[in-house]
Amino acid sequence: MKNNKSVTTQKEIDALGRVVIPYRYREQLGIDKNTTVDLVLNNDNIEIKPRKRACSLCKGFKNVNETVGLCEECIRMVKELDINQ
Ligand SMILES: [Zn+2]
């Protein structure tokens, strides 16, 4: 979380092992319907980490601009292509 405060909410796991992530958590982290998350098993807890969006061109995760869905390197390449036409 941005302000480094932790928030705790109790949830029950259903019969199939599912748990609902509270709306305000999803909203804060930009998690929506098809977001892929990593479930990380630590010693006695499970972390749920949203996957960063991959670049639409190179599929990399580094420096991806969420608005355009491209990494900075691919944005630079596309801009150079536009200039050279
Ligand atoms: Zn890229």
Image (tube, grey):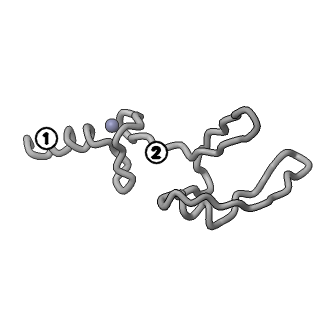
Residue at x-position 58% and y-position 49%: 35
Give the residue type at disc 2. Arg
Give the residue type at disc 1. Glu
Question: Under tag 1, what secondary structure?
Answer: helix
Label 2, on which residue? 53
The one of 84 and 33 positioned closer to us in this rendering: 33
Label 1, on which residue? 80
**Whether residue 78 is situated above or below residue 60 in the rendered picture:** below
Question: Under tag 2, what secondary structure?
Answer: loop
Disc 1: CA contacts within 10 A as few (<14), some (14-19) or many (>=20): few
**Label 1 to label 2, Cα distance in Å?**
23 Å
Disc 2: CA contacts within 10 A as few (<14), some (14-19) or many (>=20): some
Q: Earlier in the sequence, mark 1 or mark 2?
A: 2
Residue at x-position 69% and y-position 34%: 42
The answer to which image quadrant residue 48 occupies is top right
Ligand 1 rendered quadrant: top left
The answer to which image quadrant residue 73 occupies is top left
Determine whether, in the image, residue 55 is placed left or right of residue 30: left
